[in-house]
């Protein structure tokens, strides 16, 4: 709400897919607080404009400290009221009386079974809707779309489409910004920046969306879970600008409403910005609340093209990617923006399992896109440049990467135990191509990583996460996508966890990898780690026992042993979690036993046959 932009031209919509009266209450409090907060932001040039993030680090200014402190106190009191209510887990009567909207929850059966709840908390057209200094406030709307067990809700895409329809009736702004629930505005100029691109006289009218770089405010220095996608975001996505535009990443993205609603780009399409502004409805707020409800109902989309041609596309785990691709295939371009001060900050997963689950969903979704009729190579034919079609493919095929990685993790090590040499001898000239791939390619990657502002340890962690992801999350993603194709499994969006306990948070800040749960993914990771440990033992045994052949062994198995050694080094935190840690983040003992048994079985089987 506190963006550096005329408030009367802003409307903010919150989609509550949880359909919770607690969220509604928090929003009501926020609406009230905004009357103080907006003038405060202007006066003290607050950045970031999220009070929670701002007060976490800011200290009072020298001039007008009293005013500053009183607002901070107001904020903290509000926070306490909200937290107390959450603890109570119901809305007390004196609060219920504050707003007619609470009455809606008398009819809510559960979060999966309720009517549309639509409340205009601040009506920007109302002359009484002003802040404490008498300036207008932006419109603020709460929406919980209708949910019924017998109707599919299509996850985030469904909720976005409901929002698009409701907002088109109430404010109908030509540009839509969408932000995930775990992100906050970090740069009050972001709207103006994106408008600069949309309103560019030469190229602006071609742009369908402006995607901001996704950053996170909870990253540690060396990013143990490699969540920032440093190189991808800072180099690769920028590069796409030159060949048709970046993909849509789901959050921190400004869309042209028309393009999002399915309009095709026509040559010489021109927007007259003076005309598009101010097409607001002139009915009363309560009338709008009643008439818009049907737009967010379960049945509204039946027999329409919503989810197919209009709005976000249904049926994919990466609704954002597929929607962006579809828009580009309609002739629009897109742009990538990464201002010096990040536009939006989000929350990255803080445990290994959360990270793996998130990756699994993404890779599952990407592969699903590749195998669907939207496969960029075919679907984009004659619609988008070949370069852009090709650029989508590496991401789409990330999951398939698991096969090669699993091979390189398992086979060299087993062959080492069995005494089969896979790579050229150390003295052979054929060693060169292998050495080249192994060292030069990694050196290049390290260089890129450092260039994008990462640390050396960060790069090592990044490499480890590649290994973990590819051998577990991607493998399961591949597996599940195939099952889905064969009709054995259904689409399921596993929401990334937003809360974790304090101890886990501490370990995260200390950059200690959090296992602490049983999961088939951990079984795989631990087994592979054990396997390579056995491989190294086997190699050492050979070197020590065959004393006179000493050099022969190294000569023949040098590269293979080195590979095993590198894998063992990458896996050091796994051994630590398996055998040496005592905190709750260690590997559960069932995983330890399983991994030892599986690895031993694999080794014995190889030795015997
Ligand atoms: O049934 C649902 C499920 C999710 N969401 C919203 O979708 C957003 C993203 O969900 P989250 O669990 O945070 O997923 P992430 O993995 O963090 O999200 C990334 O990946 C998603 C695609 O998999 C994109 O939609 C997101 O924009 C992108 O940030 C959140 O705001 C959710 O509230 C809904 O509204 N309804
Ligand atoms: Mn998220």
Image: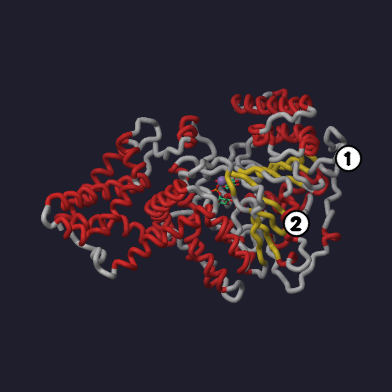
Residue receiving disc 2: 195
The part of the image, by quadrant, that contains residue 440 is bottom left
**223 left or right, relative to 590:** right
User: What secondary structure is marked by label 2?
Assistant: helix
Vertical position of residue 437 compared to residue 228: above or below: below
Can you tell which mark lies on residue 127?
1
Q: CA distance from mark 1 to mark 2?
A: 27 Å
Q: Could you say which is closer to the camera, residue 81 or residue 606?
A: 606
- 1 or 2: mark nearer the eye: 2
Q: Residue furthest bottom?
A: 382
Q: In the structure shown, which secondary structural element does the residue marked by tag 1 occupy?
A: loop
State which quarter of the image contains the C terminus.
Answer: bottom left
Around disc 1, counting alpha carbons within 10 Å, would you say few (fewer than 14), some (14 to 19), or many (20 or more)?
few
Tag count in the figure? 2
Q: How is the image coloured?
A: secondary structure
Dot 1 or dot 2, earlier in sequence: 1
Front in this rendered view, residue 378 or 510: 510
Q: Is residue 377 above or below residue 470?
A: below
Indicate the position of residue 378 as horizontal and vertical percent values.
53, 72
Q: Position of residue 164 (x, y in %)?
A: 70, 53
Q: Report if residue 22 is visible in the image.
A: no
Answer yes or no: disc 1 within 8 Å of ligand 1: no
Which corner quadrant of the image does residue 315 belong to? bottom right
| Label 2: few (<14), some (14–19) or many (≥20) C-alpha neighbours in 10 Å | some
Which residue is painted at 56% across and 48% down in the image? 150
> In the rendered view, does 469 fall on the left or right side of 376?
left
Q: Residue at x 60, y 42 (%)?
A: 182
Q: Is residue 230 above or below residue 60?
A: below
User: Which residue sits at x=73%, y=48%?
Assistant: 189
Query: Is residue 383 visible in the rendered structure shown here?
Result: yes
Where does residue 20 sit, x and y in percent of width and height?
63, 36
Q: Is 313 positioned to the left or the right of 459 in the image?
A: right
């Amino acid at each position: 709400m506190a963006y550096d932009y005329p408030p009367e031209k802003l409307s903010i919509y919150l989609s509550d897919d949880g359909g919770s009266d607690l969220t509604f209450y928090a929003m009501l409090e926020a609406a009230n607080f905004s009357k103080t907060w907006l003038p405060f932001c202007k006066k003290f040039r607050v950045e970031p404009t999220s009070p929670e993030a701002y007060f976490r680090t800011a200290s009072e200014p020298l001039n007008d400290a009293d005013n500053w402190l009183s607002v901070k106190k107001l904020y903290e009191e509000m926070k306490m009221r909200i937290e107390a209510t959450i603890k109570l887990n119901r809305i007390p009567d004196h609060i219920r009386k504050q707003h007619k909207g609470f009455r809606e929850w008398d009819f809510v059966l559960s979060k999966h079974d309720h009517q549309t709840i639509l409340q205009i908390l601040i009506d920007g057209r109302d002359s009484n809707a002003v802040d404490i200094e008498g300036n207008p406030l932006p419109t603020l709307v709460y929406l919980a779309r209708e949910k019924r067990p017998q109707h599919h809700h299509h996850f985030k895409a469904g909720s976005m489409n409901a929002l698009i329809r409701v907002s088109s009736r109430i404010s109908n702004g030509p540009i839509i910004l969408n932000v995930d629930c775990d992100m906050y505005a970090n740069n009050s100029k972001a709207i103006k920046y994106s408008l600069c691109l949309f309103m560019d006289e030469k190229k602006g009218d071609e742009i369908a969306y402006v995607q901001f770089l996704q950053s996170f405010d909870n990253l540690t220095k060396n990013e143990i879970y490699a969540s920032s996608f440093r190189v991808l975001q800072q180099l690769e996505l920028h590069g796409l600008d030159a060949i048709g535009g970046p993909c849509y990443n789901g959050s921190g993205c400004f869309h042209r409403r028309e393009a999002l609603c399915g309009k095709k780009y026509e040559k010489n399409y021109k927007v007259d910005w003076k005309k598009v502004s101010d097409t607001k409805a002139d009915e009363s707020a309560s009338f709008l609340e009643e008439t818009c409800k049907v737009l967010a109902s379960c049945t509204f989309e039946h027999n329409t093209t919503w989810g197919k041609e209009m709005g976000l596309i249904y049926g994919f785990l990466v609704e954002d990617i597929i929607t962006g691709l579809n828009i580009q295939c309609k002739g629009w371009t897109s742009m990538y923006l990464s201002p010096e001060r990040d536009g939006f900050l989000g929350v990255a997963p803080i445990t290994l399992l959360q990270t793996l689950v998130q990756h699994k969903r993404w890779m599952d979704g990407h592969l699903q896109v590749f195998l669907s009729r939207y496969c960029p190579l075919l679907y984009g034919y004659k619609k988008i440049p070949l370069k852009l079609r090709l650029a989508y493919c590496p991401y789409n095929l990330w999951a398939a990467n698991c096969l090669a990685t699993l091979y390189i993790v398992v086979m060299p090590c087993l062959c080492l135990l069995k005494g089969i040499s896979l790579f050229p001898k150390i003295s052979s000239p054929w060693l060169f191509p292998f050495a080249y791939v192994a060292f030069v390619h990694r050196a290049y990657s390290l260089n890129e990583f450092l260039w994008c502002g990462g640390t050396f340890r960060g790069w090592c962690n990044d490499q480890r996460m590649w290994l973990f992801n590819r051998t577990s999350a991607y493998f399961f993603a591949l597996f599940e996508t195939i099952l889905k194709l064969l009709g054995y499994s259904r689409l399921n969006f596993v929401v990334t966890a937003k809360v974790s306990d304090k101890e886990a948070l501490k370990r995260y800040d200390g950059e200690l990898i959090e296992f602490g749960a049983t999961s088939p993914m951990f079984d795989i990771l631990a087994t592979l780690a054990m396997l390579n440990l056995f491989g190294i033992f086997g190699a050492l045994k050979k070197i020590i026992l065959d004393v006179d052949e000493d050099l022969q062994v190294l000569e023949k198995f040098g590269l293979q042993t080195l590979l095993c050694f590198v894998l063992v080094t990458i896996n050091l935190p796994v051994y630590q979690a398996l055998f040496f840690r005592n905190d709750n983040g260690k590997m559960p003992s069932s995983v330890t036993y399983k991994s030892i048994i599986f690895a031993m079985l694999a080794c014995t089987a190889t030795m015997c046959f």
